[in-house]
Image (cartoon, rainbow, N blue to C red):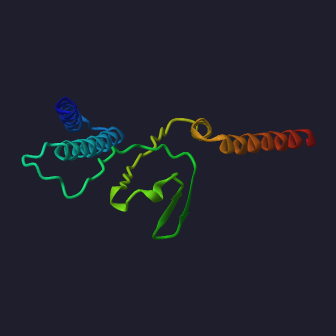
Amino acid sequence: MASVLEELQKDLEEVKVLLEKSTRKRLRDTLTSEKSKIETELKNKMQQKSQKKPELDNEKPAAVVAPLTTGYTVKISNYGWDQSDKFVKIYITLTGVHQVPTENVQVHFTERKPSYDTEADPSEGLMNVLKKIYEDGDDDMKRTINKAWVESREKQAREDTEF
């Protein structure tokens, strides 16, 4: 167990060094998220190790505590939202999350600024966004984009033949 703790500690130190050197916001956000994950895993491993220490006296422990499990990251591809002037509500579905104690659930929101190229063709930027949505989307998203594209092409073809 000590070697795992040592490795996690080395990973944490290296992430801290990289975080100090990084200047790009997106990279800093990613490193900050990773730092938090490593710190949580390190804390959990240390708690597991302290629970496994042999008893100095021959008394039995008063209660047996289940070992903590490490966290995991979920890529969210299906979500919904609602917004007003003051608030944005995000709706996601995570299987089994209601069985996890509230204090064990952590959410990290980071900001990702899209890069704007003022000299590029605006329609090219829109096409790149749509390509990314299509590539990252689930089957329903891909069907919706395909349907919109086909309908747009059919409408354009009808308009072209009217002239």
Left or right of 2 in this view: 112: right
Locate residue 8, reporting x and y percent.
22, 34
Query: Farthest residue in the front direction?
Result: 58
Q: Give whichever of 20, 63 is nearer the camera.
A: 63
Locate residue 57, reporting x and y percent.
7, 49
Locate residue 22, reporting x and y percent.
26, 36
Locate residue 34, reporting x and y percent.
31, 40
Q: Quadrant of residue 107?
A: bottom left
Residue 122 visible at all: no
Q: Give whichever of 34, 68 is nearer the camera.
A: 68
Q: Quadrant of residue 159?
A: top right
Which residue shows up at 49% across the image and 53% down it? 96
Quadrant where the N terminus sits is: top left
Q: Give whichever of 49, 63 is nearer the camera.
A: 63
Residue 115 visible at all: yes
What is the number of callouts on the image?
0
Which residue shows up at 18% across the image and 35% down it? 9
Which residue shows up at 34% across the image and 40% down it? 30
As displayed, is residue 84 above or below residue 125? below
Query: Farthest residue in the left direction?
Result: 56
Left or right of 26 in this view: 94: right
Quadrant where the C terminus sits is: top right
